[in-house]
């Protein structure tokens, strides 16, 4: 079938696969380095407790068959190693079926991690990585020309990402309709980056241009992705430029980079004047064509649910309609906070809490804390605790499942938990009490920055968590994890 092959897109496919493998690598590294405190057998939301109450059919994955911390680590590090090999080009030197198997293994490993990740993995870009990763299984390798149907499925995916985000904004917060959301967004976004302060202080007319341009790039430009060339290439370039703007303005894990990777599937390099020489691909196997066409038919059927969601007046963001996270609906920032509230966590080593108690603040890696600290760039790496702390500042309900277990682990200086933090004010011994207070944060202006050297100004609002000790948490049913015995290796008990 001549129409099936699209050899002119070989460079686009290569870039999509390399970027996607790099983002898989990022996801597996984040899982390997953070899981013990978050979902490990001694973590805040342990996997064994989750799998005991949620059956396999509701959250399929390897950890329903067996769990131990060592096994989880083996899954995460194996995924990281395979991802790195695919970044280096392993997929193009293997036979086609073996290359497809590598991508399928990556998808299955990451699906297993996401499906037991609970609230720590409740972000839209987890499903987006899984959906894109599943499509990548059928992109082929250097043995075959890129399959046109699968390239179209990638275009359809990035269309849903962008168009869904545009619709949820138009239907959601009124500030998107009156073009004022960007007055607040750069300051109140989950994790500002090093340039967010400067974006926030752009003149108001430019903020209005930003908001208007967002509507164009998310509601008009995505349609171009589904049109013939060269329109699709130009639309993809606009998507890439827009996503790079977002990369510069904040930390959104790998959402922006993954959207860029998907958009590249619509780029015909020749339309951009790139000197791309055609490759001599072999004949596409019939079995591969059959699988790609079956995938296309399945995606078309499963697209009913996200399309119905997009046209609904009650559109929701970031929902999977099946346990495999295939053909999902997406969206971001349907509403924008007008003020920034941050939970500040502190401890004391004094035996009795009084009005004169000296409290020392814990430092987080990414979220605002020390007002003089410049916001850091972490994306595409995902600091899961820091992101959930942002939600905790919006409403205590978001933190209810894990905040007291978090406090319990601080009270014993749990090493796995402390690795998620930038600064532990009690290196020589655990605190006797911890507490949390809610603060209002705002960016300083130019004059304040020059005078004080502070990027933020903060004002205490109210007590978020009254001072607690281990006895109080034990009475509430939140006991700290037992210390790891030498040689135990963190096995699930």
Image: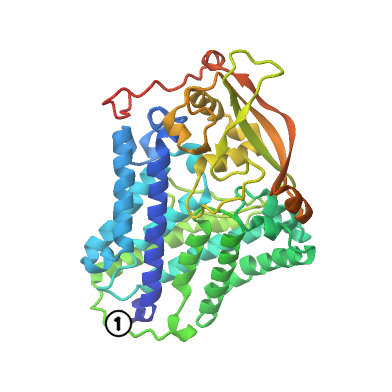
Count every numbered label the image shows and give the total. 1
330 up-or-down from 459: above or below: below
Residue 30 position within the rendered picture, expressed as x and y whole percent measured from the top left: 42, 46
Q: Is residue 488 left or right of residue 479?
A: left
Query: Which residue occupies 66% across, 20% down?
Result: 357
Residue 87 position within the rendered picture, expressed as x and y whole percent measured from the top left: 33, 62
Dot 1 alpha-carbon crowd within 10 angstroms: few under 14, some 14 to 19, many 20 or more: some
Determine if residue 298 is in view.
no
Q: Residue furthest left?
A: 95
92 up-or-down from 43: above or below: below
Q: Is residue 134 left or right of residue 307?
A: left
Out of 51 and 312, give the one closest to the viewer: 51
Residue 288 position within the rendered picture, expressed as x and y whole percent measured from the top left: 27, 68
**Quadrant of the image occupied by residue 4:** bottom left
Out of 414 and 450, give the one closest to the viewer: 450
Residue 51 position within the rendered picture, expressed as x and y whole percent measured from the top left: 38, 31
* Image quadrant containing the N terminus: bottom left
Looking at the picture, the colour scheme in use is rainbow
Q: Residue furthest front?
A: 451
Q: Is residue 100 left or right of residue 370?
A: left
SS for callout 1 = loop
Determine if residue 55 is in view.
yes
Query: Which residue occupies 62% across, 36% down?
Result: 392
* Image quadrant containing the C terminus: top left
**Residue for badge 1:** 279
Query: Which residue occupies 52% across, 16% down?
Result: 470
**Quadrant of the image occupied by residue 287:** bottom left
């Amino acid at each position: 079938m001549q129409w099936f092959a699209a050899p002119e897109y070989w460079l686009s496919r290569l870039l999509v696969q390399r970027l996607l493998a790099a983002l898989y690598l990022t996801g597996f590294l984040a899982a390997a380095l953070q899981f013990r405190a978050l979902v490990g057998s001694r973590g805040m939301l342990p996997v064994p407790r989750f799998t005991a109450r949620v059956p396999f059919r509701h959250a399929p994955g390897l950890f329903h068959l067996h769990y131990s911390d060592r096994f989880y680590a083996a899954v995460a590090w194996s995924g990281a190693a395979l991802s790195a090999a695919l970044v280096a080009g392993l997929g193009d030197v293997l036979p086609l079926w073996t290359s497809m198997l590598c991508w399928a293994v990556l998808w299955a490993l990451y699906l297993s991690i996401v499906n037991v990740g609970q609230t720590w993995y409740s972000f839209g870009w987890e499903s987006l990585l899984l959906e894109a990763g599943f499509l990548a299984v059928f992109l082929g390798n250097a043995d075959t020309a890129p399959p046109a149907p699968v390239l179209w499925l990638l275009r359809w995916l990035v269309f849903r990402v962008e168009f869904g985000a545009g619709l949820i904004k138009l239907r959601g917060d009124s500030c998107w309709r009156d073009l004022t959301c960007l007055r607040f967004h750069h300051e109140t976004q989950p994790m500002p980056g090093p340039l967010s302060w400067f974006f926030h202080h752009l003149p108001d007319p430019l903020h209005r241009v930003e908001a208007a341009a967002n509507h164009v790039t998310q509601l008009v430009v995505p349609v171009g992705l589904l049109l013939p060339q060269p329109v699709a290439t130009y639309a993809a370039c606009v998507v890439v430029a827009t996503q790079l703007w977002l990369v510069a303005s904040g930390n959104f894990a790998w959402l922006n980079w993954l959207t860029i990777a998907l958009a590249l599937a619509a780029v015909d390099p020749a339309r951009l004047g790139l000197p791309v020489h055609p490759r001599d691909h072999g004949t596409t196997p019939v079995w591969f064509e059959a699988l790609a066409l079956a995938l296309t038919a399945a995606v078309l059927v499963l697209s009913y649910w996200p399309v119905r969601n997009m046209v609904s007046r009650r559109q929701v963001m970031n929902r999977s309609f099946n346990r495999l996270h295939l053909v999902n609906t997406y969206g971001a920032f349907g509403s924008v906070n007008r003020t920034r509230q941050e939970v500040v966590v502190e401890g004391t080593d004094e035996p009795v809490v009084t009005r004169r108690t000296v409290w020392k603040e814990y430092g987080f890696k990414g979220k605002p804390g020390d007002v003089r600290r410049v916001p850091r760039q972490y994306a595409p790496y995902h600091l899961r605790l820091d992101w959930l702390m942002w939600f905790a500042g919006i409403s205590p309900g978001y933190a209810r499942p894990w905040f007291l277990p978090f406090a319990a682990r601080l009270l014993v200086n749990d090493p796995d938990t402390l690795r998620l933090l930038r600064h532990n004010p009690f290196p020589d011994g655990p605190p006797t009490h911890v507490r949390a207070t809610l603060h209002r944060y705002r960016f300083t202006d130019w004059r304040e920055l020059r005078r004080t050297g502070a990027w933020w100004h903060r004002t205490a609002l109210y007590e978020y968590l009254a001072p607690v000790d281990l006895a109080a948490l034990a009475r509430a049913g939140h006991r700290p994890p037992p210390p790891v015995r030498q040689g135990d290796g963190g096995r699930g008990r």
